[in-house]
Amino acid sequence: MTTSFIEGVLTGSIQSSTSVLYAALGEVVVERAGVINLGVEGTMLMGAVTGFMVTAQTGSALLGVVAGGLAAGVFNLILAYLVVTRKANQLASGLALMFFGLGLSALIGKPYVGQLVHGLDALPIPFLADLPVIGRILFNHDILIYLMAPLAALVWWVLFRTKWGLSLRAVGENKVVAFAAGLKPELLQYQAVFIGGVLAGLGGAHLSLAFAQSWSEGMTSGRGFIAVALVIFAAWHPLRAVAAALLFGGALALQLQLQARGANISPFLLDMIPYLLTLGVLLFVQKGRKRAMPEGLKAVFEGTN
């Protein structure tokens, strides 16, 4: 393989993993609170379309990113109302949220299909961006890419080193015990679901404002479901989610590089690479994952919540 090919794959891995990582970090927070959101796909789409619309109307990509995150957070509160307040089945509610997000984003985004915007600019880091090869791979990206690792570290610190994080994880393990300890499980779950929505919305906004700089219906292409899978792969740990997202992003970048170089392989097979890799990883790395799962989620999968 040539240096340019390897450089393209590594650079593309970072760029392609960003939207998935933001969504996965948000889902880590949500699931640590004992809620699973299968509607991440719809939440990401709401962030993507809102961010694009606001950017197209105001000319400010940063304002679009903020709007996309907040809109997705509010959208996620629908799930919180259904599963926390109304005690609806979490899996069915998540799927309903996903389909609602698909339809609503397509409806409000229809006037913007095919439009291009000036999205998030690359911000080369002085001196470091000029380094041979590594400078182009690591130090010539937009602000949301630079924030990936610090955000993962922040989520880890909040979950495992703060009183709020301890309370949230206690709720995710056993709501009854948490309530007996003086906590407010429903409030904490609402907060977790909102934060998860904001992060997923930022991932969606990055997809439309930096990765594609355009809007198209269903542009997430399954990334929301991949984010949920990566949370399991990362054993509900935000720092491990970084490696999981980079692995998926690398597979996506690899198939794009192969297509760009005219590889004599069916493009349909190449498109399957990232998703087959995700399935393969989940198939062979299950050891210890069940023990890492918050106790509150086990009831969801067993059909008791």
Image (spheres, rainbow, N blue to C red):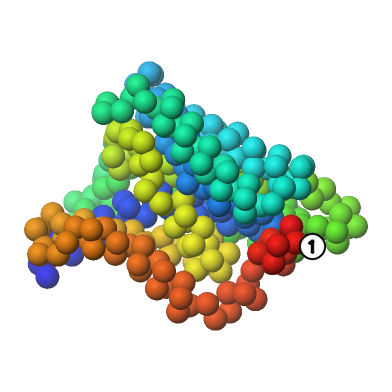
Q: Position of residue 230 (x, y in %)?
A: 48, 62
The answer to whether residue 114 shows anywhere in this view is yes
Assign a secondary structure to mark 1.
loop
Which residue is depicted at the point 42% across and 36% down? 48
Viewer can see residue 247: no
Single out the residue that lies furthest toward the top: 57
Q: Is residue 214 left or right of residue 50?
A: left
Residue 217 vertical placement versus 295 (above, below) = above
Give how far across and how far down residue 73 sits, in percent: 58, 37
| The quarter of the displayed image where residue 156 is located | bottom right
The image position of residue 24, as x and y in percent, is: 50, 55
Q: Residues within 10 Å of mark 1 (few under 14, many from 20)?
A: some
Which quadrant does the N terminus fall into?
bottom left
Q: Which residue is mark 1?
A: 174
Q: Residue at x 19, y 58 (%)?
A: 267
Percent of width and height locating residue 101: 50, 37
Which corner quadrant holds the C terminus? bottom right
- Taking 275 as reference, is 68 left or right? right
Q: Tell me which residue sits at (54%, 81%) in the image.
A: 287
**In the image, what residue type sits under mark 1?**
Asn
